[in-house]
Image: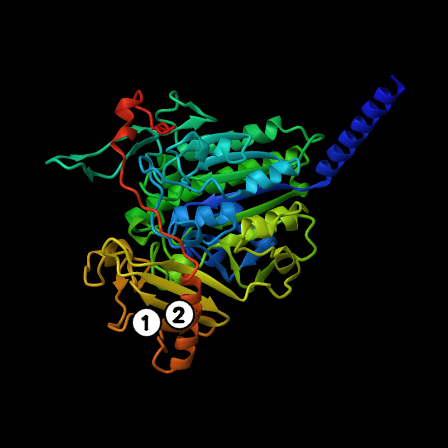
Amino acid sequence: MAKLFVTVLTLLFWYQVTKANAATKPNILMFVIDDLGWNDTSYKGSDIPTPTIDKFAREGIRLQQYYVQRVCSPTRSAIMAGRYPYHMGLAWAVISNGHPFGLPLNQTTIASELKKGGYATHSIGKWDLGMHKWEYTPTYRGFDSFYGYYDAAEDYFTHRVPAAAVHLGNDDDMIFNGLDFRNNTKPVTDKNGVYSTNLFTEAIEQVIEKHDTDEVPFFIYAAYQSVHAPLEAPQKYIDECQSIPYKNRRTFCGMLRAVDEGIANITMLLQAKNLLDNTIIIFTTDNGGQTREGSSNWPLRGNKATVFEGGVRGTAFVWGAKLSKLNYDNNQLIHATDWLPTIVEGIAGLELDKDKWALDGYNVWPTITSDSETPRKEILINLDPPQKGFIGQAALRVGDWKLITGQPNCSMSPKRSKYELNCPSGWVHMDGSIEPPPPNPSLVWLFNVTADPNERDNVAVNYPDIVKKLMQKIELYNATHIVQLSPSLDYRSDPAFHHGIWTPWLH
């Protein structure tokens, strides 16, 4: 009996120690804003007023040399797993509903690692990392809770997703349409007509309200649907943007105003609950802005889905009341893959088995908080081998230099000019007009992006040795790539077979 009593006391002691250690760790609130362009926040001089975002950016650490992938799923996989998408087969395609693939199950996630260290983990908003099997959905990937949708885009009010048309071997193309909204694994069917930005803000507030401050720290992955297409916002937010003369940008402004209001409400609640001072806020886009839908990357070149700076140089900042160095521009190289080791090791102070997970990311927390030299010397911006008619594309930044080779935009062919509207590789002005780039039949670009961040001077012919050196680096990366996944739409996923709801259909 005495031995049992001692054992119980020992367990209680270690429980209290673990509880105390967890309580000293900071909360982490990560905002991922969908399709936010370089010139879409007023702290950067945008015509869109974003006072709350501005406040935290100006007080915080602004990441000026921060890179993401060119589209959403690749960036979100890089953030969540700390690996380059091409190492996971995810460099090629957006993971849309009905397509049987996702973030591979042999990869860890930020949530899984933080959960081991005693964090409560919550995913709210856009997932976009797979839904064909339950194992690919958030509550099976380390999150205690999920409130949001699985697809890359959907209607902001009806929360329905129409899948892209697919030819199924007959004369008809099929378009699948269904509800995509979940509370954990349960469909949410009573929010038709309610704007998703407001729903996600309320969900984040509920997590904070319920949080037991004496128990464990939290990690909230707040992936707003905004400001991705379709262009939809309640009229009251659009009315706040009447000074903007361009219709698409005016609606886009309303969408971003709703996000800014949401962040204000969330941070005021954190302050009221005495949690804000012990919370690290991370704010990032997932790719450059879609100019066709009202976003702006000016004066950077390019657009979402391109590897020019307008597609991959991301708006991002970090804020924390207790950080030793604040209110400055950090100009060190940082990539989306760095978030996993930075959050897990740097912020949470947990151990991470980097060899097991073969991470491409670095713990850049010392770089961010003290402006010390980054351990990252280069960024593989993209490596997309030729397939399905696509001629292939690679982009690499090393120091001041950036090399691009292959497809300049998102077309299957560099001659299909309509893609210059979807993802222009030139410069899109504030009025939406496109300044086309000069012809480049070589499909090789070299820029000194420190001296020429707007990529107007292709110096590839002037520095053939640098081109050769960077090409060799790309070849080394290419030797480690795996087959990139892009499966066709599976007719069995049709929501018509699942009560009108997008549901994992494979077991």
Image quadrant in which the N terminus is located: top right
What's the residue type where badge 1 is placed? Val
**Mark number for residue 232?**
none
Q: Residue furthest right?
A: 2
Picture coordinates of residue 485 (x, y %)? 34, 47
Q: Left of 503 or right of it: where is 142?
A: right
- Write the residue at 29% across / 57% down: 431
Q: Is residue 323 left or right of residue 205?
A: right
State which quadrant residue 425 falls in: bottom left
Identify which residue, 53 or 120, lies in the foreground: 120
Q: Residues within 10 Å of mark 2 (few under 14, many from 20)?
A: many
Q: Are marks 1 and 2 in contact (CB under 8 Å)?
A: yes
**Which residue is at 26% across, 72% downward?**
438
For the C terminus, the image quarter is top left
Residue 342 shows in the view: yes
How crowded pointer 1 is (Cα within 10 Å; few <14, some 14-19, many 20+) is rated as some
Q: Tag 2's secondary structure?
A: strand
Hey, what amino acid is under mark 2?
A: Leu
Decide which of 34, 57 is in the foreground and name it: 34
Which residue is at the far left? 171
* Residue bearing the label numbered 2: 403
Residue furthest bottom as drawn:
462
The figure's colour scheme reads rainbow
Please, what secondary structure does the residue beneath circle 1 have?
strand
Mark 2 or mark 1, which is nearer the start of the sequence?
2
- The percent position of residue 151, horizontal first and vertical second, equals 36, 37
Q: Which residue is mark 1?
A: 444
Residue 345 in the image, given as x and y percentages of width and height: 64, 49
Residue 201 visible, this orientation = no
Residue drawn at x 54%, y 58% as measured from the top left: 63
Q: Residue at x 44, y 63 (%)?
A: 477
Residue 335 lies, in percent from the top left, at 50, 57
